[in-house]
Structure formats: C-alpha cells, structure tokens
Amino acid sequence: MNAMHESRFILHIDLDAFYASIEQRDRPELRGKPVIVGGSPEGRGVVSTASYEARRFGVHSAMPSRTAQRLCPEAIFLPARFEVYRAVSQQVMAIFQAHTALVEPLSLDEAYLDVTAAVHHLEEAAQLAREIKQQIRSTTDLTASAGVSYCKFLAKLASDAHKPDGLTVISPEQAPAFLEALSIDTFFGVGKVTAAKLRELGIEHGADLKRLGEERLRALLGKHGSQLYRFVRGEDDRPVEPRRERKSIGKEVTFERDLVDRDRMEGVLEQLAGQLERRLVELDLRGRTLTLKVRWSDFQLITRSVSRPEGFQDAQAMLPVLCTLLAQLAGGNRPVRLLGVSVSHLLSREEVQRTGRVTALPLWDRE
Ligand code: TTP
Ligand code: MG
C-alpha cells in the first residue's frame, strides 16, 4: 500500500431504504410495517425499494412487484413521489456540502465525501461521520449508514456492512482481513456472471481472489480484472469527483463473452434503458438525443443517435428506437463486446416548459 492511500479520509454515506423511509416518515401509520415503493403488483412494475420490514420476506429492489406481493402478502404498495425524494436529497447534499466541497453524489441518497482537509486521523473522520448522521436525522428525520476508510471502495463496503443506521470504520490495518473475508459477490464490478466464473475456479472469498495473479485476472475478466487485482489488495486511488455540469447520462455493459444473439442484445438494451430511465426520473431530466453505442469484438466503436424535440425519459420510448438502431448496425452476425445507451442535450423540466412548444405533451405523467 502506498502512502497516498493512507493519507486520505473518505466517507460514504447512504440513506436507509430511502424512498420507503420517507413514506414511513410522512405517514406514521406505516411505521414498523412492510412498505414497498414501486409499481403496482397488478401491473408489470418492479420494486424501487422496500422497507426493512419487507426485506425480511426477501423483497428487494428491481424485483417484479408481483413477486414481492407473493413473498409478502401484507406489504403496502405505494407509488413513488419523486418530487419529495428530490427535495430530501437536496437537504442531505447540503449537509454534506457544509463539511467539504469534495462531494460526489452517486444517486439521490448516496455520496462519497473526501474529508481529508477537515480531519487529522481516522477516528476524527468517524466522529465527523457520526455528526453528519446526526444532522441528517435532525434535519430530515431519516437514518443513514456511513462508511469511513482511506479509499472509495472500502468506504462504500463499510457503509454497507451495518445497515440500517450503521457506522463502520475500516482502517488500513483492518483492510486486508476485511477484504480476505469478503464474498466475491460483494467486490465492485463483479456481476453474477463473473462471480459464477470465479466460483468455477473455486474462488469464493477475497483470500482466494488474492491468489490469482494480475495477468490471470485480466485474462479472465478484462480490464475489470486489473481493477479487482488492486481492490482485493485495498488499493483504490480513484479521487472523489464533485459533479461538473452534466453533459450526458448513460449506462453501458461490457460482456464477459461477446454476444451474437440479437434477442439477448435487445434484452440487454431493455435493461440499460430501464436503468437510464431510473436515473433520469430521479434527476428530473429528459435527453433530447438518444445514443446507442456498440463495440464490436474487434474493439471498433460505433455510435448512432436519434433526436426528438420532446426528449427521451421512458425506457418504453427508448427501446424501439434503440432496437432499430441496433438492427441497422448489426446487419450480419457480428459479435458485440459492449452495448451502451445514453442521452445528451439534457433538458430540465423548466427548460422543456420554457421552450413552450412541447408543454402540451404529458411529459411527466408517471408522477
Ligand atoms: P439504494 O440506496 O440502493 O437503496 P435504499 O436506500 O432503498 O436501501 P439501503 O440503502 O438501505 O439498502 O437506492 C436508493 C433509492 O433508489 C431507493 O430508495 C429507491 C431507488 N432505487 C430504485 O428505484 N431502483 C433500484 O433498483 C434501486 C437499487 C434503488
Ligand atoms: Mg440507500
């Protein structure tokens, strides 16, 4: 471990069951009950999040609401109230900003903070995390979990370690044992496919992972392999990056094995569009230009875009466009290594309304 790792103090703070906790806060009769925020179980919707009472039944984010109801028949289903969640998010981010300018939000309820300039040692960083949790509670009446460490990767693992209302510190001395005991599913960048691949090799925990050389991991997992090689050694130099003005928002995925099957590609596009929609809804943005990105197996990269004045936000509107673009590109059976979906020329609700010409459209009928 080099000196740089030890000289930083990073917090990761993440509110507990964010949407569901806000609903329980605003409707006291829901407290202590299994609450699910998301699509109705009668439709084809999915769970956005579930209160911890509902999670005990196995309910989790992204699960079809119908499945969630089967697992937890008493659950109370509620539609999302994004405007309220965004307002709470602004309160929480303002609390973070008061302690450091180096705040990197990951979503509405989650951010990294680099507090190196504000504290002298890890115990002091932990004390600051405790204070921030207290401020969140007194300002919003909600609980958060905090992780404290010397890099982003470990801070995030730490905040996840004792949810809800947790505070976990991972010191440079504790990091090796923590990482060796960690299940491979929990490592950053390890998806289900990768985990299954590693399991086939008898790799279950960080300690097993540590036995693989960098070359081997890279051969197995591509560039993620190198990152994993460093992470399992507690090495993560990524800086906390406060967001500049956003130009585009996108989601992409690189495949372990190149895809040749068009149906599978379309399935991936559906997932990516769904993730992108979620982020756009959270941020209350639409993107006028929708872009499909394809990297072929020979690493050649191609992008194709379509623009619409009313912009894109719903996955349902994006998907047919993406599938058409894909069909135009992937004429033959050329294997695909990466698929990405993004939107640019971002428009806030105010901007769309100000331009006048699209105000008549039911742009935000989801809310
Ligand atoms: P998370 O922080 O991942 O989840 P959470 O806050 O509900 O629960 P916890 O942190 O205690 O594990 O996501 C924050 C919010 O983002 C969540 O309340 C709802 C929304 N969300 C979705 O809409 N879909 C998803 O798949 C996920 C993971 C989250
Ligand atoms: Mg959360």
Image: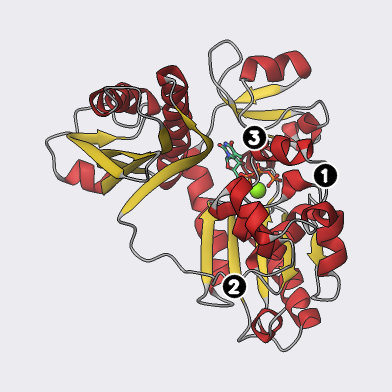
In the image: residue 348, left or right of residue 103: left
C-alpha separation, residue under disc 1 versus residue under disc 3: 14 Å
Residue type for callout 2: Asp
Please give the name of the residue rendered at 62% of the width and 79% of the height, measured from the top-left corner.
115
Q: 38 above or below 253? A: above
Q: Is residue 222 left or right of residue 190?
A: left
Mark 3: C-beta under 8 Å from nearest atom of ligand 1 = no
Measure how far apart labels 1 and 2 are at the Cα level.
Answer: 25 Å
Question: Which residue carries the number 2 mark?
Answer: 237
148 in relation to 275, above or below: below
Tell me what residue is drawn at x 61 percent, y 40 percent.
19
* Amino acid type of the residue that numbered disc 3 sits on in the rendered structure: Val
Q: In the image shown, does 330 or 99 lie closer to the viewer?
A: 330
Which residue corresponds to the image point at 41% horizontal and 23% vertical from the top-left? 266
Which amino acid, mark 1?
Glu
- Label 1 element class: loop
Mark 2 neighbour class, 10 Å CA radius: few under 14, some 14 to 19, many 20 or more: some
